[in-house]
Image (cartoon, grey):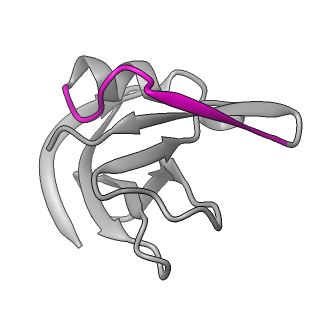
C-alpha cells in the first residue's frame, strides 16, 4: 500500500493510500493521519476488470461528498463513466496520482 499526500476529509486529516483489490482493480483507502487507523474506503470493487488507473468511487451513504474532495485534491478526475448498483449509480474516475 502506498501512502500519498494528506488531505482534510470531513474534518479529519487523512492520508490517501492506494493499493489493489485481489482482482487487480485500484483500491483507495483513507487513513487517519494522526493515528494511522482506517478512516474510510473511498473505492468500490466490482467483478469488472478495470484498465489500470481507473477506479469506482463510493460517493453515497457515509461517503457522500468524498468524490468532490478527491477531485478537488487532484486524486481522481471528473467522472469518466458510471455503473448502476442496487439503489445508487457509482461513478468511475481516473486516478491522477
Kindly give the residue lying farthest to the bottom in the view shown: 22
Q: In this view, does 37 lie to the left or right of 62?
A: left
Specify whether residue 12 is in view.
yes
Residue 18 on the magenta span: no
Residue at image x 51%, y 65%?
A: 49
Which quadrant does the N terminus fall into?
bottom left
How many callouts does the rendering have?
A: 0
Residue 2 against residue 32 in the figure, above or below: below
Q: Would you say residue 80 sits in the magenta stretch?
A: yes
Given residues 11 and 63, the one toward you in this image is 63
Residue 16 is left or right of residue 6, and the answer is right
Image position of 1 with respect to 74: above or below: below
Quadrant location, the C terminus: top left
Q: Which of 26 and 80 is in front in this view?
A: 80
Q: Measuring 60% from the left and 31% from the top, which residue is drawn there?
A: 82
Foreground residue among 10 and 57 = 57
Seen at 29% across and 33% down, the residue is 76
Q: Is residue 97 above or below residue 63?
A: below
In which image quadrant can residue 67 be found?
Answer: top left
Question: Which residue is at a point 36% across and 20% down the rendered structure image?
Answer: 78
Q: Determine which quarter of the picture holds residue 17.
A: bottom left
In this picture, which residue range is highlighted in magenta? Answer: 74-85
* Residue 68: image location, x then y, percent: 41, 18
Q: Which residue ends up furthest to the right in the rendered image?
A: 87
Residue 96, x across and y down, in percent: 18, 38
Amino acid at each position: 500500500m502506498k501512502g500519498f499526500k494528506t488531505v482534510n476529509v470531513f474534518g479529519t486529516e487523512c492520508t490517501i493510500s492506494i493499493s489493489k483489490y485481489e482482482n487487480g482493480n485500484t483500491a483507495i483507502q483513507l487513513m487517519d493521519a494522526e493515528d494511522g487507523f482506517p478512516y474510510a474506503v473511498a473505492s468500490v470493487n466490482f467483478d469488472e476488470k478495470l484498465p489500470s488507473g481507473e477506479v469506482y468511487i463510493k460517493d453515497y451513504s457515509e461517503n457522500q461528498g468524498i468524490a468532490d474532495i478527491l477531485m478537488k485534491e487532484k486524486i481522481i478526475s471528473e467522472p469518466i463513466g458510471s455503473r448502476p448498483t442496487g439503489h445508487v449509480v457509482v461513478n468511475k474516475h481516473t486516478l491522477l496520482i
